[in-house]
Structures are given as structure tokens and as C-alpha cells.
Image (cartoon, rainbow, N blue to C red):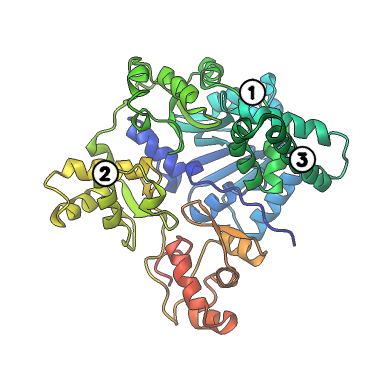
Amino acid sequence: MPPWPGAAHAFLHPDRMSLLGALHGLATTPITRARVLELGCRRGENLLALAAAWPLASFTGIEPDVENARVAAERAAAAVLTNVTLVNGTLDALAAPGADALGEYDYIIAHGLLSRLVPASREALWAIVGKALAPSGVALVSFDAWPGQHMLEPLRRLMAFHVAEIPDPQARLVQARAIAHWQADRWFRVHGPARHTMLQRALAELDALSDDELAHELLAEHHPLSLEEVIAEAEPHALQWLTNARASEPRLGRASEHIRPIVSAYPDVVRQQQYLDYFFDTRFRASLFCKSAHELRRQATVEDFEPLFVAPRADVSPDDVPALSANARWMYNHIVDRPTPTAVRDVANEALTAGFSDDRVQAIVAISELFFADAIELARVPPPIATRPPDLDERPRATSYATLQAQRDALSATSLWLRDVALLDDERATLALCDGAHATDQIVEQVGPEAGDALVSLVRHGFLIGGGA
């Protein structure tokens, strides 16, 4: 069976959307009882993982591609997910006059879709979001952005042109990669290393894409947009830009001392963001939107952060984020060995007694810095993760979707944090048996003694539910 293409991303988690909305003054709905709509859900990589983790919430996926919709439905059935509704249909049909209303949703996700649509279909997308988003709801819309796409666009166009008459899908992908590298080598021969260096970032991103991602991201119809253009399309549907969905988006606080005075001279946050896109050569954006009736708070307070929950990321260390302040590095080391998500107020109070400083505000500011550097997990409602490996007589349980991924030999699986985690063979075999029906000693008997280390890893990455019982 071919590998299962992974497409789960933590920034698409409705709880992350809820958290960012709440920081801006919205009374967002907790994920535990949320209604979630994903437009262009593909094969359910995000939607089904969320549905398996949050059984009391409801999830609806719209997918225009017949084969993708079929695979998503088959996976949902195999994972026994009863809180999912999947619809095979186009945005144009769903937004047409007389079409059945989709209902109202607390969170709407449209990831990797907007830049693949012609203007009329983009209008349909915004019409659906405007009508279906709940009054205090949050929508995430991602898109390929100018000006950063200018560097990749010549390569993308060359690849699409080169493979246009190749019928075999796999041969198309092989030839697309080959012509891109051939062109980069030619640039080196003709123009020397300086201009060739400009292509290295684009080539590195191209090489990192799976075949499935390459087909979707680079060879499909492609319409990059600026942030201002996207906001202009959203505004007629009573929607306003809320904030960035990803920690890696340009932020004024991360700008250099040379850039910050230019950008901060403008009070309008959208204009600031557009300047940053030009200065940072932004290539991709994931933006949150809400109803335009809201008067948003643009500066979060310490009190906004206090009730949130913090936990370490399993795949990040301070060395991965070199720009952290000394306070943030101290706080990371205080958080990293915690076994379970803990309220920010409690972590801050503990830090004071551990000698961080005598300023509680500084402690919470350090936690917020770690979050916006994507160095920790921060949640409004943390997932029900296990805090320790299971005892021999306990029956460890992951979500039905994660065990399905492992049982079907996926190269990675989706954690309760909605992160795609690469699996070693022993981890995959162990996760496949974490269905609540096998005791730990049975898993060790089937997988071998290495299952013990695999269970530790699965706990660390947030796969196992509860206490393993």
C-alpha cells in the first residue's frame, strides 16, 4: 500500500484559532463543542484527525474532487467516526442561488485553496464563509502570497509547461523536478553563483515537497494574491482580517531596528502586515478572519494569557529558535520537562518561586514569546494527552484515526496536537495496537521489547489519550 500523504498542520487546529480569537477579544467557542467546516478537505488529513480527537464536536468537510472525497469517506468509516459529514461538491454549486444552506459554524478552514481558484470561485468561497461563519466564529484562509511567489513563479511555470503533454502522473512529477534543477544549473553556468543562489531557497522548498504536495502546490492552477487583495475580497462579505494564523508569519516584533520604525509609523495593522510582506518576501500566508462587526483588541493582556495551557513541543529546542530572549530561554527550560499541559498562571507562579524574577508579568511575556516563536504548545482547551507511559496491565489508546494511519503503514501519523509526526518502524507497529483492546504486555509480546521505548515516544509526542488506561 502506498504511503499515506500527510497534511496535518497544528496552525489549522480550531483550538489554536479559538485561542488567537480570544486574545483579540472574541468570545470564541471551545473546541469541545465546536462546529467545524473545512472547505477543500482533500482526503480528510486534518478533518478526520480532529474528529477522532474531539468526539463531542461536529465536523463537515467539502471536497470537490470525487476521488479525494471517496478516500476521505472510506477513512472516516474505517476509523468509525460518527461526528463527520463529508460532501462531494464544488464551491460554485454550494454558493449558487437556491443551494441548500450549509448551516452555521464556529470555525471554518480553507487551507491551500484560495490561490487555486479563479476569481468567480474565490467569490463563491468568500460568500460561503460570510454566510456560514457564526457571529463569534473564526475562519482560516491560506494562500500563496506576493511578493514571495515571484521567485518561485518562473520555476513553477517552466515545470507546468514542460510536463503539459506528459500523460503519466508519476512521469510528470519526475520531469517537473528534473527541469527545475536543470534550469538552476543552467543559471549557475550562465550567470555565476550570485543569481544561482537566489534559486536555492526555491529549490530547497521544491525538493522538500512530497509528490502529492508537488502536484497540488506547483502544477495546479495558481493565482498568488497579496494580503490587501485577499482582504478586499473578504470585506464585502462582512469579514475582517483578525490576525496571523501561524507563528512564522511576519510580525512587527520580529522586524529589525531598521524596518520597525518604517512599519510602526502606520497605525493600521493591515498596512503594517503588507509592508512586512514586502520586506520579508512573504511567499505563503495563513490568515484568520472574523465578522466585521467586532471591534478587535490589537494588544493582548497578561490576563488574556493566564487561563491558557502551556506544554513543551516534542520536536523543538531553544537552539531551533536562536532569536529567543534570555527570559524566554529560561522559561523554556522550566517548561520542557513538564508531563502535562499546565495553566499559564500556574507556570508563571512556579517560575517566580524557582528564581525566574520577582515580576510575574515578565514570566507570562516570556511564555507568549515562546508561543509566537512556535517553540511550545499553547492551548485554550488542551487535548486529553497521556502524561506517562502505560503500565503493563493498562490498555493504551490513541485516536482511531492515528491507529488507522499506523495500521495502513503510513510514514507518519497525526498527534493530538494535530502535528504530523514521522514514525519509526517500532513506533508504527506499537501505535497500530494502541486501540484500547491490547494491554501493554500484549503489545510488548507482539512488537518486542522495543515497544517500551516506542510507547515513551508516543506519549512524548502526544499520541496516547488519558493516562493510558
Residue at x 36% of width, y 31% of height: 26
Q: What's under tag 3, amino acid-wise?
A: Ala
Residue that numbered label 2 is attached to: 366
Residue placed most toward the observer, 443 or 348: 348
On residue 332, the disc is: none
Q: Looking at the image, tell me whether mark 2 or mark 1 is earlier in sequence order.
A: 1
Give the spatial CA distance, label 2 vs label 3: 45 Å
Q: CA distance from mark 2 to mark 1?
A: 39 Å
Q: Secondary structure at mark 1?
A: helix
Q: Residues within 10 Å of mark 1 (few under 14, many from 20)?
A: many
Residue 445 is drawn in which quadrant? Answer: bottom right
Q: CA distance from mark 3 to mark 1?
A: 27 Å
Task: Tell me if 200 is positioned left or right of 318 in this view.
Answer: right
> Mark 2 or mark 1, which is nearer to you?
2
- x, y percent for residue 208: 62, 47
In this figure, which residue is indicated by the disc labeled 1? 122
Q: Secondary structure at mark 3?
A: helix
Quarter of the figure that contains the N terminus? bottom right
Within the image, what quadrant is residue 42 found in?
A: top right
Name the residue rendered at 53%, 61% in the picture: 399
Residue that numbered label 3 is attached to: 176
Q: Secondary structure at mark 2?
A: helix
Neighbor class of circle 3 (other Cα within 10 Å; few <14, some 14-19, many 20+) is: many
Q: Position of residue 100 (x, y in %)?
A: 65, 29
The amino acid marked with disc number 1 is Arg
Q: How many marks?
A: 3
Q: Is residue 395 visible?
A: no
Q: Is residue 360 above or below residue 225?
A: below
Q: Which badge, 3 or 1, comes first in the chain's sequence?
A: 1
Q: In the picture provided, is 228 more to the left or to the right than 62? A: left
Residue 67's place in the image compared with 155, above or below, is below
